[in-house]
Image (cartoon, helix red, strand yellow):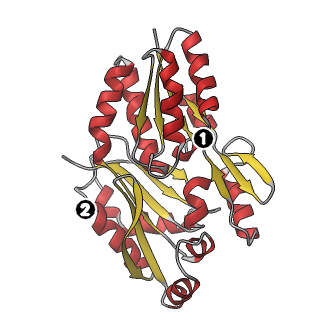
């Protein structure tokens, strides 16, 4: 009996990467106007940002349904396997409730884990699950370990613009305008499953320094666990600048930093130019 790992595209794990890891990523639906796209299947992250930049009407994403989860769980169960399904935070989407309802029909062979995170924060929890699966742990053992460690995951992001928070109604036009004039760069984090503003700085250099300070104050990076950096938009220039500015964080710990392009779930609100880091804090 094998263990199958299932997650959703809010984790920003591409279909190609999922195939390499031997997991399944269920795509959320991204909607631009009247047109629906399957996140990461019929719309890549690059194509998403091209459309985001070109349109005045903000897109939105639709959660996965109970039926979609049932279908994925049944396919695994019919092969005699157990399932660990790692979903985006229940405080950000109803997908978790749908997955848990679907799991009830499989007699304990499907375990749903609320990641209490999203984007690359959710992603590194999935990568930890893959590590545990490859070490031979059962589905129940993997789920228990994920639930024990998810509180140590930290996701921090520096936004380059307030424009898309304004478009999504998250801040007022006045605040966005003033922030633009002052070159305000907000730092956001996932705190207890929700996205929260934790700081702001003037200019990208100060923003990078603030992001680095928050990484240190969060407990520092456990380099023995999965970690990754992320960027939103069509190019990673601002991420590369952050890496140079924060070199002391990584020097001597790793030869190559894993990098991920952020997709539509967070990209809708962050807009292009965001820089993010996800890691397990040192305990």
Extreme residue toward the right, this view: 34
Question: CB atoms at circles 1 and 2 under 8 Å apart?
Answer: no
Which of disc 2 and disc 1 is earlier in sequence?
1
Q: Residue at 58% of width from left, 29% of height from top?
A: 69
**236 in relation to 63, above or below:** below
Q: Position of residue 233 (x, y in %)?
A: 62, 63
Q: Secondary structure at mark 2?
A: helix
Residue that carries the numbered disc 1 in the rendered image? 14
Crowding at label 1, few (<14), some or many (≥20) Cα neighbours within 10 Å?
Answer: many
Q: Position of residue 11 (x, y in %)?
A: 52, 44
Q: Is residue 263 visible?
A: no
Residue that carries the numbered disc 2 in the rendered image? 216
Judge from the rendering whether residue 250 lies leftward or rightward of residue 15; answer left or right.
Answer: left
Q: Position of residue 235 (x, y in %)?
A: 61, 63
Q: Is residue 33 visible?
A: yes
**113 in relation to 204, above or below:** above
Judge from the rendering whether residue 47 lies leftward or rightward of residue 83; answer left or right.
Answer: right
The label on residue 60 is none
**Corner quadrant of residue 176:** bottom right
Q: Residue at 30% of width from left, 61% of height from top?
A: 215
Report the quarter where the N terminus lies.
Answer: top left
Judge from the rendering whether residue 154 lies leftward or rightward of residue 32; answer left or right.
Answer: left
Front-lying residue, 81 or 183: 81
**Corner quadrant of residue 208:** bottom left
Q: Residue at 54% of width from left, 41% of height from top?
A: 95
Front-lying residue, 75 or 258: 75
Judge from the rendering whether residue 256 lies leftward or rightward of residue 28; answer left or right.
Answer: left
Q: Residue at 49% of width from left, 50% of height from top?
A: 119
Q: CA distance from mark 1 to mark 2?
A: 29 Å
């Amino acid at each position: 009996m094998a263990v199958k790992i299932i997650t959703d595209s809010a984790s920003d794990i591409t279909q190609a990467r999922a195939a390499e890891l031997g997991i399944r990523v269920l795509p959320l639906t991204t909607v631009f106007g009247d047109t629906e796209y399957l996140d990461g299947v019929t719309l890549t992250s690059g194509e998403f940002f091209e459309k985001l930049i070109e349109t005045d009407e903000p897109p939105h994403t639709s959660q996965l349904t109970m039926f979609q989860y049932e279908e994925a769980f049944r396919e695994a169960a019919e092969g005699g396997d157990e399932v660990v399904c790692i979903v985006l935070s229940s405080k950000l989407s109803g997908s978790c409730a749908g997955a848990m309802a679907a799991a009830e029909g499989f007699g304990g062979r499907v375990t749903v884990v609320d990641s209490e995170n999203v984007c690359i924060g959710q992603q590194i929890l999935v990568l930890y699950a893959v590590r545990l699966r490859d070490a031979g742990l059962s589905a129940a053992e993997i789920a228990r370990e994920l639930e024990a460690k998810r509180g140590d995951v930290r996701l921090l992001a520096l936004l380059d613009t307030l424009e898309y928070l304004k478009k999504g109604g998250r801040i007022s036009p006045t605040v966005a305008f003033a922030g633009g004039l002052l070159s305000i760069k907000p730092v956001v984090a996932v705190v207890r499953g929700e996205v929260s503003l934790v700081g702001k700085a003037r200019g990208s250099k100060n923003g990078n320094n603030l992001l680095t300070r928050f990484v240190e104050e969060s407990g520092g990076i456990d380099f023995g666990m999965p970690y990754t950096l992320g960027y939103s938009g069509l190019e990673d220039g601002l991420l590369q600048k952050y890496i140079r500015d924060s070199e002391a964080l990584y020097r001597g710990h790793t030869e190559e930093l894993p990098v991920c392009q952020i997709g539509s779930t967070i990209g809708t609100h962050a807009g292009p130019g965001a820089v993010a880091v996800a890691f397990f804090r040192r305990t």
